[in-house]
Amino acid sequence: MTHRLLVTGSGLSVLIAAAWLSATPVSGQSPAGPAAAAKPYKTPRTVDGQPDLQGIWTNQTYTPLQRPANVTKEFYTLDEVLAAEKRAAVREAAVSTPGTTGDVHYSGSEFGLDKSQGTLARSLRTSLIFDPPSGRLPPLSAEGEKRAAAFAEMRKKLGRFDAAQNNELDDRCITTTNAGPPMLPYAYNSNYQIVQAPGYVMILVEMMHHIRMIPLEDRARPPQSVVALTGVSRGRWEGETLVVETTNLNPTTVFGGIDLDAPLDRPAPFRGVSDKLKVTEWFTRIDAESISYKFKVEDPTTWSAPWSAELPMKQTIGPLFEHACHEGNFGLYNTLRGARAEEEKAAAGEKKPN
């Protein structure tokens, strides 16, 4: 596993301010403001004349998917963001107390990969979600509520760690939230390499080394019953923006590992998307070191309305190294051993620990 020095970025309605925000030292100096970055950015071109998105990027952030219940505004000030990041780093360290469940399962600090190390891809947004304007997910549809209840009942009956198939897919080294779509940050190693060739865009995801191969033409899609971890994507250029539409997503893997009501590195209490899910993504180069990444999620059998989010992608150092998750991984093995030990204690009449 690798660790990157991450750099700063900005949110949807402060795209113009991205350059001056990324140049601002964390010591708290005040940025000059949007007016200082009025010169339009000219995106470089690939050999076939397309906007050049190539490079190694990160979307590591402390910004939660949903706006916290006690926050009512859409954007923080820079000072508020820095304070929030400091509090999050303290919480992260507390969760990562050696020997606790959080340390083993929910944090990157056991690998020396705390998000607080280095500089983050920073957004002034109070949530990644910007639509609905509440910054929170729309209510579940009736069918979505039914599936969520069934999932919760299954998890309650089978237990979170009692069997390999009950563990999250990242515990099993199958996939993480980074791969997407949508490509959401993970607890660590939220890094990507974008490579373009005539007719294609390739996105290499560092975690699990997923490869998203996106044809830039409207090819026929397979039947809805044919699903894949990262779905079936088709891309096109709309001016300076790469638009990617993805269907045929595996409903058991999309959003795996995300708690939709908590920080992004907590386990999922809800796995309810359907095979009708569609994700649309927009990639726009906004300066030499920044990409605006926006996405829209549509699944009428899960949510009562579509929802959209944005997060910055910032250029980071490379190369991406081979990600060896499964090799030498005793985490899942030890988790199952722990579950068996608890069962033996219960059978012997010992009280199960909290």
Image (cartoon, helix red, strand yellow):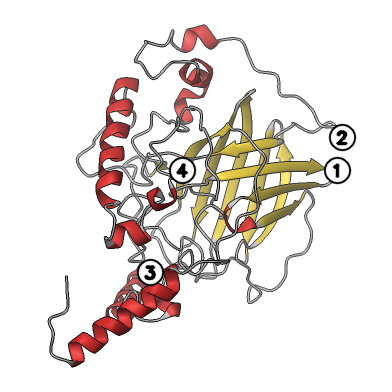
Q: CA distance from mark 4 to mark 3?
A: 20 Å
Q: Secondary structure at mark 4?
A: strand
Residue 232: image x %, image y %? 68, 62
Residue 277 visible, this angle:
yes
Q: Is residue 92 above or below residue 53?
A: below
Residue 256 position within the rendered picture, expressed as x and y whole percent measured from the top left: 46, 63
Q: Is residue 349 above or below residue 257?
A: below
Q: Sequence order check: which comes first, mark 4 or mark 2?
A: 2
Q: Which residue is mark 4?
A: 309
Could you say which disc has been placed on residue 48 in the image? Answer: 2
Q: Which residue occupies the foreground of this view, 22 or 128? A: 22
Q: Amino acid at mark 4?
A: Ala
> SS class of the residue under badge 2?
loop
Task: Identify the amino acid type marked 2.
Answer: Asp
Q: Secondary structure at mark 1?
A: loop
Q: What label does residue 144 carry, if any?
A: 3
- Mark 4–mark 2 distance (CA, rounded to whole Å): 30 Å
Q: Earlier in the sequence, mark 2 or mark 1?
A: 2
Where is mark 1, residue-wise? 198
Query: Tag 3 or tag 1, which sits nearer the N-term?
Result: 3
Alpha-carbon neighbours of circle 1 within 10 Å: few (<14), some, or many (≥20)? few
**Given this view, does label 1 or label 3 mark the residue nearer the observer?**
1
Left or right: residue 311 compared with residue 156? right
Q: Quadrant of residue 64?
A: top left
